[in-house]
Image (cartoon, grey):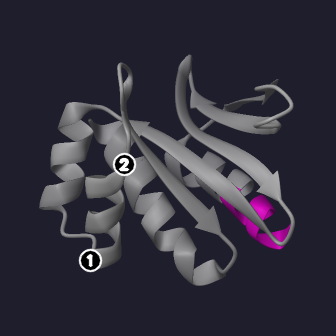
Amino acid sequence: KPLWDEVVVGMAGELGLTGSEWKSYGAKHGWALQLRRGKRNIVHLSPCEGSFRVILILGDRAVAAARAARLGIKAAKLIADAPRYPEGTGIRLEISRARQLPLLRKLARIKLDN
């Protein structure tokens, strides 16, 4: 819960994510909190036991910017292995430790900038 709160409150302040809405995606996928700037969905957070999942859908420009940002080997693998959807590339992270938050913030910033 402290990490969840840090993401929700921290990203709202740092990135200007002023909107949020809980959505249910069915019994298989459960509930997710969408964090938005205006009408644009930036991050989806799904609670799990002991952690939470984060999904960011990056467009082609954001994917190129993330690759150019040299975020590290693990991030490069996440992007390379991410599924492609009509909306963009779906980056999934499982957050269970505070040391994972900088990558989430960087990816969210890249999405906003592109």
Residue 67 vs residue 83: left or right? left
74 on left or right of 16:
left
Q: Return the residue nearer the eye: 70 or 15.
A: 70
- Most extreme residue toward the front is 28
Where does the image place residue 108, in percent across and percent down from the top left? Answer: 44, 49
Q: Residue at x 68, y 33 (%)?
A: 34
Q: Is residue 39 above or below residue 12?
A: above
Q: Which residue is mark 1?
A: 73
Picture disc at residue 82: 2
* Residue 5 in the image, given as x and y percentages of width and height: 79, 60
Point out the tag, 1 or 2, that comes first from the N-terminus: 1
> What amino acid type should be assigned to the residue bearing mark 2?
Ala
Q: Is residue 61 on the magenta stretch?
A: no
Say what amino acid the circle numbered 1 marks.
Ile
Please say if 19 is above or below 8. Answer: above
Residue drawn 51% across the image and 52% down it: 92
Determine the residue positioned at 37% across, 48% down.
82
Q: Which mark is residue 61?
A: none
Q: Quadrant of the N terminus?
A: bottom right
**Quadrant of residue 59 within the rendered picture:** top left
Question: Is 3 covered by the magenta stretch?
Answer: yes
What span is in magenta? Answer: 1-7
Packing grade of label 2 (10 A; few <14, some 14-19, many >=20) is some
Count residues near mark 1 (Cα–Cα under 10 Å), then give few for <14, some for 14-19, many for 20+.
Answer: few
Q: Secondary structure at mark 2?
A: loop
Label 1: state its secondary structure: helix
Disc 1 to disc 2, how far (Cα)?
A: 14 Å
Residue beneath the point at 66% across and 55% down = 53
In the rendered image, the quadrant that contains the C terminus is: top left
